[in-house]
Image (cartoon, rainbow, N blue to C red):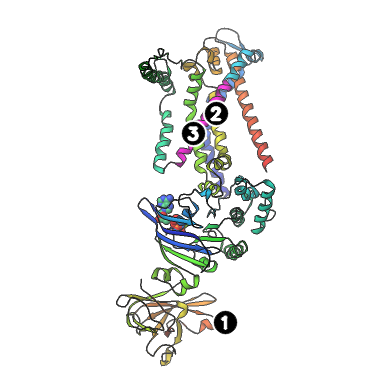
Amino acid sequence: MTAKTIISFENVTKRFGKVVAVDDVSLSICEGEFFALLGPSGCGKTTLLRMLAGFETPSEGRILIDGEDVSRTPPNKRPVNMVFQSYAVFPHMSVADNVGYGLMVDGVLPAERSRRVEEALALVKLEGYGGRKPDQMSGGQRQRVALARALVKRPRVLLLDEPLSALDAKLREQMRSELSQLQEKVGVTFLFVTHDQDEALAMASRCAVMNRGLLQQVATPSDLYEFPNSRFVADFIGSVNLFEGRFEVDEADHAVVRAPELSTPVYLDHGVTGGRDATVWVALRPEKIELHKRGDGQGAPALGDAPDGHNVVPGVIRHISYLGSESVYEVELDQGRRVRTLRTNLTRRDQEDFTWDEPVWLAWHACSPAVLLS
Amino acid sequence: MEENWKRAKAVFAAMAGPPVFWLAAFFLVPLGIIWAYSFGENSSLTEIAINGTFANYVHAIQPLYLGIIVKSFWFAALTTALCLVVGFPVAIAITFAPEKTKAWLLLLIMLPFWTNLLIRTYALMAVLRTEGYINFALAFLWNSLGHLTAAFGHPLAAFTPLELLHNNFAVVFGLVYVQLPFMVLPLYAALDRLDRSLLEASLDLGAGHFTTFRRVVIPLATPGIISGIIVTLIPSVGAYLTPDLLGGPESLMIANVIERQFKTANNWPFGSALSFLLMYMTFIAIAVQAMVARNRRGAAR
Ligand SMILES: Nc1ncnc2c1ncn2[C@@H]1O[C@H](COP(=O)(O)OP(=O)(O)OP(=O)(O)O)[C@@H](O)[C@H]1O
Ligand SMILES: [Mg+2]
């Protein structure tokens, strides 16, 4: 990306007593990005965000906004604004006063102020709600007030802490796309925190995955999903089957991994750097494994891109979850290992193709597995 | 469901019965008797004839007594204001103290309740009197300073102890000392309920600490401030022990006058009338305050 860097964390560590909430994080965020901080509960996402807003000071390292060190700058002097998880809408002020609060504090004159408040309310589709009190509004509307209140200050970066977690499922879906549209419209850099991977994949232009205070991987949503760099990321983003193994062949244009749990070796159409003599893990996404019939002595399917005797293993269907648009099959391999595969129900009769306890072949293409070194 | 509710009603009655009886027998009935006395006159040394006269009230609104009532309200208002000014920072400090320290600080605030008011007041006298600790400390400082200036050839005059006791200052000082916990506790309760993220939101939007305090903390703590004012003001108006022990001849408060009517002057009807006059005025003050508050809230909507 060639865009200008707006935020950088430089080796930032935050300790609360003995707890290391954020551990040596270095991260750059570019102008105009819709950036997601993703990770399980307690991994330090909120702490990182609060350090950027100025509510916590880093124990070590620096935080730069537009190239300027703000590590010790108080929150009211930073060009960032935050949408709190609880929204933190002032209950004793009308909606318009809430939205205008930051402008009033900055000494913006009343005429200009009310114009900008109206503008901000229109932006979040709350025209005409200015006179209401927050207790007369729904949770979703209060959140829009919080959004307008932060955006009206025209921040360099808008920080959102789990903005959708308090909304019900329908509204959450709707707000996802509204937030994305809003971001495109105002062009402000958004940095949002979530523990919901679907949310991050759907909205973000780039994601950082955190685990126990450490930054695990920073990538676009599709790279995170298709090219995870660790078992943690592969497992956290979506669902995955992991097989422990070792390299048998590792050339520039192909590689073979032998995994004891799989009866045939795994053939890859690319070489892997590193991990030559160490334990590696083969990651296979459920939707990338094909199901083929094995009853009546039907032979292994030909894959075309892998040599015979590779990437095809026999198994028996042990469990089927019908999810409407797709079905999840749990297949038990000869060695007793269970593998999840997923099949889209393309026609209305697709889910009848396979039944419980049916012998099947599992097969995958040479480009499907990812090899993880950690 | 209905059965349940009926049984609950019986339980409720059983629970409420004794306190209601207690309240009626030992508070409302005596109050009624005093109220009746206020419309009577002494018919002999020990008997009071209740004859519906308003003479006691006419007597009570003489400038002499009205002046003392006004002074009592003035003392109480000053006490309340000082408690608010001193108590707010204390309440804020407790609210934002670490969880462990908080419990200790609250205990410290409530510690005075464990000691009798009389003993506390005598202890205060030991602090304030001319040979008390404050004067002792001041004398020490003055004399040290005197040694210093004497070395440069300018000796200071001998230290004259400050008269801290038996005057209006001592009364207000004592009232503030007694009432401060009653102000701090409701303020603390209100501040502790305040959502911290509201304060952070205010800072985040560019407000400084003072603006945040004025625009967010005070409006949201208003219920606590009002109850703090009420529980400080009303007992202060009727304070008896503090002005009796710490006050001088010119710092009498209305409760001292009432006590004299009941005891030394043996004029119960007049004492009763004064008591009720004070009560009416307190009620009116609260009612006016409540009306103003409601109007303001109505206007804000
Ligand atoms: N003020 C604090 N004092 C002590 N420990 C804290 C404080 N704030 C956070 N922590 C600890 O730091 C770690 C990271 O917390 P943080 O709130 O950043 O997690 P998170 O990723 O936002 O989690 P969640 O998804 O549950 O909100 C946790 O172990 C937490 O207990
Ligand atoms: Mg959090």
Work out which residue is located at the far left of the displayed protein and give it.
A277
Q: Which residue is mark 3?
A: B184
Say above or below: A294 vs B65: below
- What residue span does the magenta drawing correspond to? B72-97
Asked whether A122 falls inside the magenta stretch, the response is no
Dot 1: element:
loop
Give the CA distance from mark 1 to mark 3.
Answer: 70 Å
Q: Which residue is mark 1?
A: A348
* Mark 1 residue crowding within 10 angstroms, few (<14) / some (14–19) / many (20+): few
Say above or below: A182 vs A259: above
Task: Give the residue type at disc 1.
Answer: Arg
Task: Using the rendered view, name the quadrant where residue B212 is placed.
Answer: top right
Q: Nearer the viewer, residue A129 or A49?
A: A49
Say above or below: A238 vs B93: below
The CB of the residue at mark 2 lies under 8 Å from ligand 1: no
Task: Give the residue type at disc 3.
Answer: Val
Q: Nearer the viewer, mark 2 or mark 1?
A: 2
Give the CA distance from mark 2 to mark 1.
Answer: 78 Å
The chain holding disc 3 is B
Give the CA distance from mark 2 to mark 3.
Answer: 12 Å
Q: Nearer the viewer, mark 1 or mark 3?
A: 3
Dot 2 and dot 3 within a common chain: yes
Dot 1 and dot 3 within a common chain: no
**Is the residue under label 3 in contact with that under label 2 (CB below 8 Å)?**
no
Percent x, y of residue B14: 52, 37
Q: Nearer the viewer, residue B152 or B206?
A: B152
Total labels: the figure holds: 3
Percent x, y of residue A193: 50, 60
Dot 3: element:
helix
Work out which residue is located at the far top of the displayed protein and give it.
B44
Asked whether B89 falls inside the magenta stretch, the response is yes
Q: Residue at x 37, y 89 (%)?
A: A309
